[in-house]
Amino acid sequence: MFGKIREGLKKTRESFGKTIDSLFKDKKEIKKTIEELEETLILADIGISTVSKLIKGLEKEDNPKESLMKRVREILSSAEPFKTQNQKPYIHLFVGVNGVGKTTTIGKIARKRSESGERGVVAACDTFRAAAVEQLDIWAKRSNVEIVKNLEGTDPASIAYDAVAKCVSKNYDFCLIDTAGRLHTKHNLMEELEKVVRVINKGLSGAPHQISLVLDSTTGQNGLNQAREFLSKIKVTDLILTKLDGSAKGGIALSIVDELKIPISYVGVGEKVEDLVLFDAEEYAQGLFE
Ligand SMILES: Nc1nc2c(ncn2[C@@H]2O[C@H](COP(=O)(O)OP(=O)(O)OP(=O)(O)O)[C@@H](O)[C@H]2O)c(=O)[nH]1
Ligand SMILES: [Mg+2]
């Protein structure tokens, strides 16, 4: 059976993998091949510094394609894999720019946790759009979890606080906190996020246990810039790469791991509840090529 990550990488593989294959099959001068390879890697949204690592001295290798695949594998497994801790309640915060897939990802995780017998809440701290709360409400019902949402005039931090307090008092297993999409360049919104984190920590020492930055893989290198900004403001623990199924820019995962040294925890490969899978460096590397 083919894995979901491989399936999600179909578009990337069709442009990237196929080009690389034909590059190495053409009996051209190896120098020329490496030059073209460099271009292909950059076009697949792998940043320049990572590309340099991938191609350095490749022409001297006995089997350049094999060596390239090995290097890709090494880079993808270079960040310490993300491990969920066993805290109860487990407080998990989701952040990211607009429309990347935060709410959908929360819905998927809520369902998984609920199906495995855990009890918990989702917190609708997106107070900008009424529709955002409704969207989370639908997921909550589908997943059979409670939702904590705003009363008139409450701010995101106080909703997060209420949600955490509820989980503590009811001895729940998890709390998934949704936030409004925000541009990483908007200073006041980033400050609001810092406040949410602070207030959660007041509600439960050591929390949030996980802060996932959700990135849309179709945005490629721009996602890397977003990540840098978020990382400079809050303690992001891991990245969730969504919409891999619609993206030919799956190469971005290499830049993320190589440049930010932050693990990818999950990969989103579609809109349905089952379309969220744990990141697997080996399957990802393989899926880029074949
Ligand atoms: N194809 C595909 N679509 C996805 C994936 N994840 C999310 N989406 C879709 O992306 C769109 C935006 O998802 P949301 O979950 O609303 O994104 P968000 O980050 O909560 O957006 P804001 O709250 O507006 O910032 C929706 O139409 C989702 O169905 C994925 O892995 N693959
Ligand atoms: Mg949302």
Image: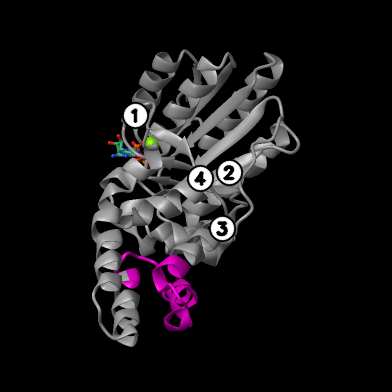
Label of residue 130 in the image:
1
Lower position in the chain sequence, tag 1 or tag 4 = 1
Crowding around mark 4 (Cα neighbors within 10 Å: few <14, some 14 to 19, many 20+) is some
Q: Measure how far apart labels 3 and 2 are at the Cα level.
A: 10 Å
- The magenta segment is 41-68
Amino acid under disc 4: Asp
Q: CA distance from mark 1 to mark 4?
A: 36 Å
Report if residue 264 is visible in the image.
yes
Residue at x 68%, y 25% (from the top left corner)? 89
**Residue 98 locus on image (x, y percent):** 36, 46
Amino acid type, mark 3: Leu
The mark found on residue 280 in the picture is 4
* Residue drawn at point x = 49 percent, y = 75 percent: 53
**Numbered label tally:** 4
Mark 1 or mark 3: name the one nearer the start of the chain.
1
Checking the image for residue 86, the label placed there is: none
Which residue type carries mark 2? Ile
Q: Which numbered dot is residue 211?
A: 2
Relative to 93, does residue 170 appear above or below in the rendering?
above
Classify 207 as above or below 72: above
Res. 18 image quadrant: bottom left
Q: Describe the element under mark 1 as helix, strand or loop.
A: helix
The residue tagged 3 is 231
Q: Quadrant of the N terminus?
A: top left
Q: Residue at x 64, y 36 (%)?
A: 84
Which residue does the image show at 51% across and 53% down from the upper left?
A: 190
